[in-house]
Amino acid sequence: MDWLNPPALAAAMRDAGTAKGNLPAKTIVLTGILSGLFLGFTTTLFVSALVATGNLVVSAMFFPVGFILLVLLGLELFTGNAALLPYAGMVGRLGFGSIVSGLVLVYVGNLIGSLAYAALFAAIDTKFFTVAPDAVGAKIAAIATLKVIPYMHAGGAGWLTAFSKGVVCNWMVSLGAVMALVSRSVIGKIFAMFMPIMAFVAQGFEHCVVNMF
């Protein structure tokens, strides 16, 4: 049988969260950096598709590429680990300190990777800052502005809106991390991860690691 039933899935979540929580700090940070890089390039891929097609839903179909790759390679992502580590703690496999340290370390790694790719892409897009950005670079800047300024101008309601969009986004990303465990086959894992990741992008929710880029 290619798929796991709910009890088997819960056991897989427990084991995955336990394994992630017991990784050495250096491993968490390094694999977190790689995940940040992966989500950076999948973001520029998404924006390139958006510029080419002008269609958000079609472009969102390209975004899961980075998430699928990092999960299949066993890398660490804050938003996925935010589901698996606490679950392992809830069933008594991880202590509170291990959960917190694991999430902090992967967050730092994701941030480093995201910033590194942002700097690299900006340099490439502007021929090392000698020309203006192309249509993709300009679109990225416009999207970044929309992810900050409107929320600021709305005051408390804006911050609450951004937070709520982040919560819903992370719910969908957590579903992606969990759905990766549902299937035993690579093609099954790819399809299972694709759906929730595409869904959050198509609806314009806020992903904290993507927004680092």
Image (cartoon, grey):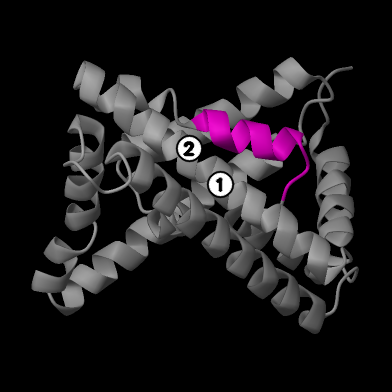
- Residue appearing at x 18%, y 72% in the figure: 157
- Residue appearing at x 72%, y 19% in the figure: 188
Packing grade of label 1 (10 A; few <14, some 14-19, many >=20) is many
Packing grade of label 2 (10 A; few <14, some 14-19, many >=20) is many
Horizontal and vertical percent for residue 197?
50, 36
Which of the 4 image quarters holds residue 6?
Answer: top right
Point out the image quarter for the C terminus.
bottom left
What is the three-letter code of the residue carrying label 1?
Leu
Q: Nearer the viewer, residue 133 or 194?
A: 133
Q: Do the residues labelled 1 and 2 touch (CB within 8 Å)?
A: yes
Magenta region, residue range: 64-75
Please give the label number shown on residue 193.
none
Please give the label number shown on residue 41.
2
Point out the image quarter for the N terminus.
top right
Q: Mark 1 points at which residue?
A: 37
Mainly helix, strand or loop, the magenta region? helix
